[in-house]
Image (cartoon, rainbow, N blue to C red):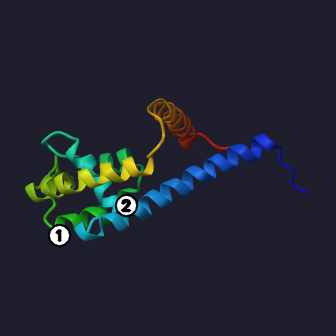
């Protein structure tokens, strides 16, 4: 019979809650931005491309930055290229390219960002600034540990 102590249950419950929160946030985001024909995954991709220099970003670097598979980046960017939001720029050889936002992609972000901020504000409404800062620091610690674990075998 499997037995767990309270600490085991607590850590499991916190990790499960973090996964649920991420899923729920994506669902609410997708619903909020349906009128812009934009998903949270596409929004994250557009923001990540926007944050790099004018040269653009290689899809493999984008995948690493967003913690998603290279194939997922390919699928997401194909849709954004078709919509005229992202352009593929030539890379260092014929097999590589860089992704860069178009003017239309920047304009879509400018329309989406205020709503994204309002959504974040609504999700965290009533939580004191100091508590939010503590939560941010704790989440950064968790992310750093997960980064270390992602390359190490889990026992």
Q: Quadrant of the N terminus?
A: bottom right
In the displayed structure, 29 sits above or below 18; it is: below
Front residue of 127 and 105 = 127
Front residue of 143 and 34 = 34
**What kind of element bears circle 1?**
helix
Can the viewer see residue 155?
Answer: no
Residue 70 position within the rendered picture, expressed as x and y whole percent measured from the top left: 36, 56
Can the viewer see residue 25?
Answer: yes
Residue 87 position within the rendered picture, expressed as x and y whole percent measured from the top left: 14, 58
Residue at point 48%, 40% (across, down): 127
Disc 1 to disc 2, how far (Cα)? 22 Å
* Precedes in sequence: disc 1 or disc 2: 2
The quadrant where residue 153 appears: top right
Q: Give the number of the disc on residue 29.
A: 2
Residue at point 31%, 66% (across, down): 75
**What kind of element bears circle 2?**
helix
Q: Residue furthest left?
A: 103
Q: Give the number of the disc on residue 82.
A: 1
Front residue of 80 and 6 = 6
Residue at point 76%, 40% (across, down): 7
**Residue 116 left/right relative to 133:** left
Residue at point 17%, 50% (across, down): 93
The quadrant where residue 11 appears: top right
Q: Quadrant of the C terminus?
A: top right
**Residue 115 left/right relative to 102:** right
Q: Residue furthest front?
A: 126
């Amino acid at each position: 019979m499997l037995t767990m102590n309270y600490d085991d249950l607590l850590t499991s419950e916190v990790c499960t809650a973090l996964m649920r929160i991420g899923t729920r946030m994506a669902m609410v985001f997708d619903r909020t931005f349906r009128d812009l024909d934009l998903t949270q995954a596409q929004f994250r991709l557009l923001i990540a491309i926007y944050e790099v220099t004018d040269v653009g970003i290689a899809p493999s670097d984008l995948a690493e930055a967003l913690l998603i598979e290279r194939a997922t980046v390919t699928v997401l960017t194909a849709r954004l290229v078709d919509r005229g939001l992202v352009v593929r720029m030539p890379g260092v050889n014929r097999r590589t390219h860089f992704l860069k936002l178009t003017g239309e992609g920047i304009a879509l972000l400018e329309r989406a960002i205020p709503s994204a901020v309002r959504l974040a504000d609504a999700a965290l409404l009533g939580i004191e600034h100091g508590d939010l800062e503590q939560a941010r620091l704790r989440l950064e610690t968790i992310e750093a540990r997960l980064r270390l674990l992602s390359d190490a075998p889990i026992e």
